[in-house]
Image: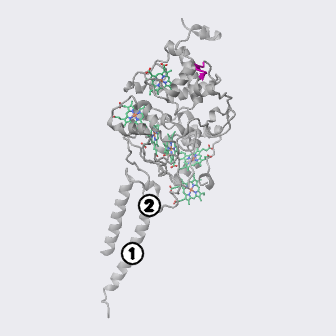
Amino acid sequence: MGSRWVVLLILAASCIGCSSLVKAHREPPLQIIPDMDDQPKYKPQAAGPFFGDGRASRPVVAGTVVYGLESGRYVSGNYAFYAGIDIERSETFYTGKEGDKYTGKNPLPLTEAVLKRGQERYNVTCANCHDRVGTGQGMVVLRGHPPATNLHDDRIRNMPDGQIFNTITNGLRNMMPLGHQISPEDRWAIIRYIRALQRSQNATLADVPDEQKGSLRK
Amino acid sequence: MFFPKWTNKVVKLVLAGAVLAGGGVAAIAGIVHQPSFTDVGYQPIQPVPYSHKKHAGDMGIDCRFCHTSVEQSAVVIVPPTQTCMTCHKQVKADSPRLAKVRESFETGKPIRWVKVHKLPDFVYFNHKAHVSAGVSCVSCHGRVDQMEEVQQVQPLNMSWCLDCHRDPAPHLRPKELVTKLDWVPPGDPAEIGREIVRVKNINPPLHCSGCHR
């Protein structure tokens, strides 16, 4: 009688409680006992009431030097890959320009590791539009983006590295700037890789090492 | 007699009811308090109908195109509006569904994305450590590349973290494949994982100060 009702009530309540919790729900998770879950501090990218734009963390000021960079080398911080590589971080390194001419020299050494890094970054970013071999048929172009340049055009093959660097950083006509999402080191590594791609598409017999020439078919 | 005889029964019933009800409430509170019940399935309504299925799944855009910091820092960033505009300056440039993105780009005011996964503030977590060890996004976030809207699929509670920390091998893969959510290991995942544990000397913390620092 009475106790049966109580039991039924509890069962019903727990069913309602659980069913609304198990499936997808739009409301923020219940916090019955909030412990110290929400401490009075701001985490990266959180909103805060103090500044007019609503951001708690401030956007990076132009010209800021990455944390961990000391006399041209990363001693700590984020870019572990480049920690062991000596790079001359002059004005040219950040702009691709020597005076007002584009530089033809890539400040990164030509090593297998740098090429691999460049390939990875190229595939993450550029390949969406320029596709994986560089002909300009990426998924985004197929879905309505204006055509991306074929990176095997003679014009691009003969273009100084610094000009490509500038295109990545600041964009060009229909290509938007990508500088905010690719570090300068990675931009130079990508250019190293593009040069390798271009060679692979325009290779001649002279590029084959002598000892392997015998294995080629006519 | 002041009370009739049958009231004795009522007293007993009321007492039993109170005990049952109290226990029930405590049990429900206990269950409901578990993140596996409260947090799993959380799928807030986002200000812009952005779809991971379309972008990361169908078009195959790598997670790192937008979540650029995932390999370099403890915190992953949700992309700034500029990142959307690298494509949407041109693609669907007049779509009403992107009106908020254009407005944010013009005014410089950020889009207010609603945070889905949230650890309590007293827990330390680090994406870089996990991603460079070779733990894929899929182990903790599920098949995001198949979600129209992001939904939390793992409880993110302490026992869940520890389950993996005690035996990480089955969850490890070569680092380059971390963002390929549909990757299937060729052969026994634990075997591949054990090799990675050996080579990289992987040793996730089990002591309290590893995560509560």
Does residue A114 appear in the picture of this structure? yes
Name which residue lies at 41% across and 71% down: B22
Q: Mark 2 points at which residue?
A: B31
Q: Residue A205 carries which label?
A: none
The answer to whether the residue labelled 1 contacts the one labelled 2, judged by CB atoms less than 8 Å apart, is no
Name which residue lies at 67% across and 29% down: A85
Is A99 covered by the magenta stretch? yes
Q: Chain under label 2?
A: B
What x and y, as percent, mark residue A171?
48, 26
Quadrant containing the C terminus of chain B in the rendered view: bottom right
| Distance between mark 1 and mark 2 Cα atoms | 20 Å
Does residue B183 appear in the picture of this structure? no
Q: Name the residue under label 1.
A: B18
What x and y, as percent, mark residue A34?
48, 61
Q: What residue type is labelled 1?
A: Ala
What x and y, as percent, mark residue B29?
43, 64
Is B135 placed above or below A88 here?
below
> The magenta stretch spans which residues?
A97-103
**Which quadrant of the view contains residue A147?**
top left
